Image (tube, rainbow, N blue to C red):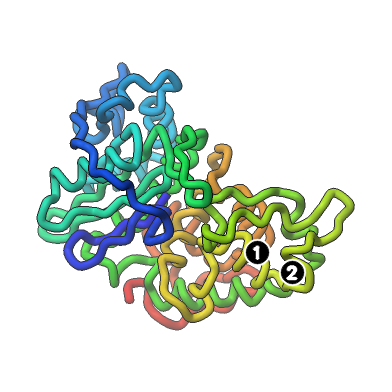
Amino acid sequence: MKRLLTLSLMAFALIAGGLFTAPKAQAAAPTCVKYEPISMRYPGDGKHQFVCGKAQNDPNGGSMIIYNAITGLPSNITTLFVNENVYWYYFYTPSDASAWFKAHYPNNPYTVTGGCGGTFTITGSSPTTIAWVSEYCVDPVNNHVPQNKWVQATALHEAGHAFEYALNPTGFNAYVSESSNFHQLASQDLANFIKNTPICNVWGTTVPSDYEVWPPSGGNPGAVCNTQGQVNKPYAGKNNEDIADVATGYFFVDKIDGGPSPLYAELFAEEWAAKTGRNAPPVFPLMDGGPLAHGFSCTAFAILWFFDTLAPPPSNITWPTGCTKPTGSWTS
């Protein structure tokens, strides 16, 4: 579930971006074959979807799950994906993905260090985006390899990244999530979210997945509140932002508030997946049910506008209550 990046100058690993322990040994690159279901619609049109190595034997039909998730998107999105060369791969493990990228892009391989999926793009005269999901994941806290129970949700999260890259395929600085307008809206959302109380109404009793927790070395802190509506010890005395740093730090810690990003790209992708009408068991259950369900209406408004129109919100629209029209750019 992860962020991409341009192969030219940058490489952020998938939901791992430096968080996870890299595989100790480099596996041989798996062989990938076209995935061609009977209906032959994008991405299973014989050109844009592949299944690799042992993932071909997945008894749960991960390739079909990915296919159904993407074909369920509106036609304006799938047409954009076709026109902007968005491809889908299903691997057995993140190690297989890493080996495949190293074999096919030896001069600047995309580094995979964990997680359940990823997205990267190559800029240039013919931009290409590759989104992938794995049957098995690397758990960032326990460093074991649980089965990916979230193939659909992972595919939709990666589709959020792919959508952003396809909108502006010229490069990183043109991506919506890296624009000054999106950052202004995210700052407004964070300010509104911090004021949202009571705490237990916002966070509830959902236990964060290990993929949401940052840093992984600290272990999973558990649910914010107990069933009696009381805040649990790891979060006592904290406001929403401080809780977010602990429980959903993959999205928040030291990122919106002045530190490095992939935050903005991850926020864009997960909001895109969570708020555009699909229903899948979330990889990020606390993020989806907490912050995204109790705030972030400003960025969500912009994302949904892009989703519906493939264009930025016009200057004369009325923004939701609590959101001030951004005054910057959507491409820088």
Does 245 sit above or below residue 329?
A: above
Which sits in the foreground, 120 or 332?
Answer: 120
Residue contact at pointers 1 and 2, CB within 8 angstroms = yes
Q: Amino acid at mark 2?
A: Asn
Tell me where residue 265 appears, x and y as whole percent: 41, 62
Q: Residue at x 39, y 25 (%)?
A: 64
Which sits in the foreground, 247 or 192?
Answer: 247
- Identify the residue at the far front of this view: 24
Left or right placement of residue 110 versus residue 73 in this view: left
Which sits in the foreground, 256 or 247?
Answer: 247
Q: Quadrant of residue 240?
A: bottom right
Q: Which mark is residue 196?
A: 2
Q: Residue at x 49, y 40 (%)?
A: 153
Task: Report helix, strand or loop for mark 1.
Answer: loop
Circle 1 Cα neighbour tier, 10 Å, few/some/many (<14 / 14–19 / ≥20)? many
Tell me where residue 305 appears, x and y as whole percent: 47, 59
Is residue 319 in view?
yes
For mark 1, what is the residue? 295
